[in-house]
Amino acid sequence: MKKAVVFLADGFEDIEALAPVDVLRRGGVDVTIAGVTGMQVVSSHNVKVMADKDVKDIKADDYDAFICPGGMPGATNLRDSSIVTDIIIDAYNKEKIVSAICAAPMVLDKAGVLAGKEFTMYPGMQNYAPSGRYINNEYVVKDGRVITGAGPAAAFEYAFNLLAELQGEEITSQVAEGMLFK
């Protein structure tokens, strides 16, 4: 079974975190929510989510994909966590999928995985990820094992791209059809 981890820090964007969790679980992916700022994490819209594990217990070898939701200050909290950036570096070096949406590509930039890669993120935030090549007006950009999304409206397209990478097009189509996603 494929496994993914979603890093959550206080101030995360609700839909950017929970849409991938939902879509991936519907598609048969074992998803772990890792608490970065505690086991109870509070979103930018004051939604409280209980993490499955503490980020200190996450190892790159145990997962196939690593997901960084945006939101402020959630994305900066992820970026400023040396544990998160170390896991992202290790995962990328082990040829795992690393991904981020909205403001969170800044986490990938700090980890050094955006260097020379095409990416997208929330418009106007691209200065926080100067090592990559920003693609404007795209909801999702995939460059090798790096998948990025533009923002809240891109959350489902981003989630379905992650599912396709992990489970293939057939399962992704079935889940999308069941969710009325077009």
Image (cartoon, rainbow, N blue to C red):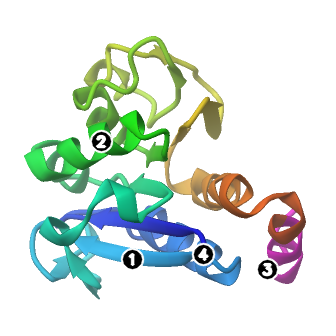
Of the residues under marks 3 and 4, which one precedes in the sequence? Answer: 4
Residue 16 screen position, x and y as percent:
46, 61
Disc 4 marks which amino acid? Answer: Val
Marks 2 and 4 in Cβ contact (< 8 Å): no
Of the residues under marks 2 and 3, which one precedes in the sequence? Answer: 2
Of the residues under marks 1 and 3, which one precedes in the sequence? Answer: 1
Quick one: label 4, few (<14), some, or many (20+) residues within 10 Å? some
Give the foreground label among 1 and 3. Answer: 1
Q: Nearer the viewer, residue 10 or 90?
A: 90
Q: Marks 1 and 2, Cα distance to the nearest angstrom?
A: 18 Å
Among the 4 quarters of the image, the one containing residue 63: bottom left
Among the 4 quarters of the image, the one containing residue 50: bottom left
Circle 2 sits on which residue? 90
Q: Where are the magenta residues, as a range? A: 173-182
Marks 1 and 2 in Cβ contact (< 8 Å): no
Of the residues under marks 1 and 2, which one precedes in the sequence? Answer: 1
Circle 3 sits on which residue? 179
Disc 1 marks which amino acid? Answer: Thr
Left or right of 124? Residue 43 is: left
Circle 4 sits on which residue? 29
Residue under the image location 19 percent in, 77 percent down? 41
SS under mark 2: helix
Give the foreground label among 1 and 2. Answer: 2
